[in-house]
Image: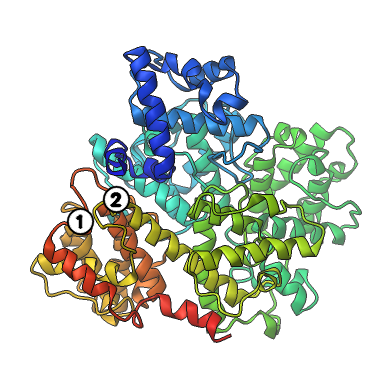
Amino acid sequence: MAGYVGILVSDPWLQNQFTQVELRSLKSHFDTMKREKGSLTLADLPSQMAKLKQVGENLTEQERESFIRDSYKCLDEVVDFEIFLRVYLKLQAHAAARMGNNVKNSSVFLKSPTSTLLHTISESEKASYVAHINNYLVGDEFLKKFLPIDPSTNDLFEISKDGVLICKLINVAVPGTIDERAINMKRMLNPWERNENHTLCLNSAKAIGCTVVNIGTQDFIEGRRHLVLGVISQIIKIQLLADLNLKKTPQLVELVDDSKDVEELMNLPPEKILLRWMNFQLKKAGYNKSVTNFSSDIKDGEAYARLLNVLAPEYTTPSMLTVRDPSERAKLVLEHADRMGCKRYLTAKDIVEGSPNLNLAFVAHIFQHRNGLSTEAKQISFVETSPDEVQMSKEERSFRFWINSLGNSSYIDSVFEDLRDGWMLLETLDKVSPGIVNWKIATKPPIKLPFRKVENCNQVVKIGKQLKLSLVNIAGNDVVQGNKKLILAYLWQLMRCNMLQLLKNLRFHSHGKEITDAHILEWANSKVRNSGSQSHMTSFKDKSLSTGIFFLELLSLVHPRAVNWSLVTKGETEEQKKMNATYIISIARKLGCSIFLLPEDIIEVNQKMILTLTASIMYWHLKQPSEDQSFASSDSDSSSMDTASTSTLDDTASESSADDISNR
């Protein structure tokens, strides 16, 4: 039955939104509706979905009908199982928005402050983001025939339909995220090529920190405005806040007094750092109020007037500080910003109305243009980072983006801070193994009593042991105390466990055998070996993998048209290795692999990330409906798997994380 459902749900993104149990239940409900109605259309769904949990319980039939009518143009469209699932997910998100995100197990498509949960868009935001795109992509050779975009039209959503613009925007926000050689760029794209671009776009957006739960490739192809704008707003926000960290702007240490404060500053999300910087500058101006948000606290424009007066006093208009009318003051603030050379991002009306997204963008741009911090090199030894800390930072980033991609109830900005009460870890565990968490003994944030946090984290450790993670000498209090090495070691094993479980779920003819790292290693080697290639990896830390050739061969074997070999280098120099590594990551994401590694993880052969890359390619390949995929497709394959399962795993990626704990 699992295989039958897998064939019916061909979209990889859609498959990942449900467990096999959920798919079976929904398929049964869908089949019942079809039997009763004969031919099922979108117009039939509001009444037919009354029996579904969350959707039926939290939305009236009139609300469901209104939502579907607003979301789809043709209600006479015949509904297949995949369309049914998409409508169900979107109604879940709508129900969650209506109920204040308290709907149990609901999936909300965006959880950052820049999200747009309802099917309305802000014309001011659209105009601002269009201006941003026009400014930063104006010189792009491929997009020049479409730019500048007219903000008064819906051209932005039409141009986004082929996926190229958003891929390019991601590279503006975080340069090098997407290898442009992997983007399908030509005058006319066929549906398959458009789908590939959007798959690449969504997986890359997740890899830079966007939350795109319940958004699929079809949403971009159909130009659904609120969804497209929600992703664009997140990408632009990431770009504007990119400098708000000590690595990019070491002068931020001026905001703190000692090493303890520096550590706290390093763990703050960029928005909080921006607010802290703004209040630091306002204090210089003698402004006694504290700005705690980018909405109500700055509606009167006074904070802006004081801030700009401190940063650029040479452009100050005396009346800016004395005028009483907020709208007039807002206009003077924007004129001051213009004289400074700052892009507006908003209108005077947006300031007075307290638009949080646009005000954040405006303040972030002011920071980028003139932050008012000391440019002198300060001798502060505690800002220096060791190689171990750099590696921990990379791993923290990967695990943070992975957790955020699961669609939990909250967006985390730091695994070291945001997981310490145990709640988000419990939610993550419930995603990895549905039903494993005992929610009756868990305490939901905000948690005032410290022992409640310890109770949550004790359950986290207990469940980890149930999942056979190596957790020797680790207790819940270690998580509460923010022990970085132990938290990273736990998350690595959990991420690995999740991937192995996904692979096990696809193993329809394996007689229930467990999947191991060695199975993944043998699968990859056998794929490449059977093609006649001499490439081989002895383990996930085989230094020969740094060239990238092995993974390019593997990708070309699982999808023959994936790799353009004319673009591949020999991988002999560091530059050639980097070119191959970025190409590998982009191709894998373009196929549908959700991966969170960086090019240097391949170049440096980071065994943890190499394992996840290989497992993700394997998972994508084995769930393709065009082939009857199984681990035991032949006697020889079954034999090799049995041999692999009994081999020693000392050379695989699981060893180091377990050591982090057992050697504590």
Which numbered dot is residue 596?
A: none
Disc 1 element: helix
Name the amino acid, label 2.
Leu
Q: Relative to residue 212, is residue 643 depicted above or below?
A: below
Mark 2: give few (<14), some (14-19) or many (20+) Cα within 10 Å: many
Q: Relative to residue 44, is residue 425 depicted above or below?
A: below
Residue 334 horizontal side relative to residue 169, left or right: right
Disc 2 element: helix
Closer mark to the observer between disc 2 and disc 1? 1
Mark 1: give few (<14), some (14-19) or many (20+) Cα within 10 Å: some
Residue that carries the numbered disc 2 in the rendered image: 591
Q: Residue at x 33, y 57 (%)?
A: 503
Residue 479 horizontal side relative to residue 398, left or right: right
Using the rendered image of the protein, determine whether residue 595 is visible from the camera's viewpoint.
no
Which numbered dot is residue 558?
A: 1
Q: Are marks 2 and 1 in contact (CB under 8 Å)?
A: yes
Q: Residue at x 63, y 33 (%)?
A: 97
Name the amino acid, label 1.
Val
The residue nearer to you, when weighing 173 against 209, is: 209
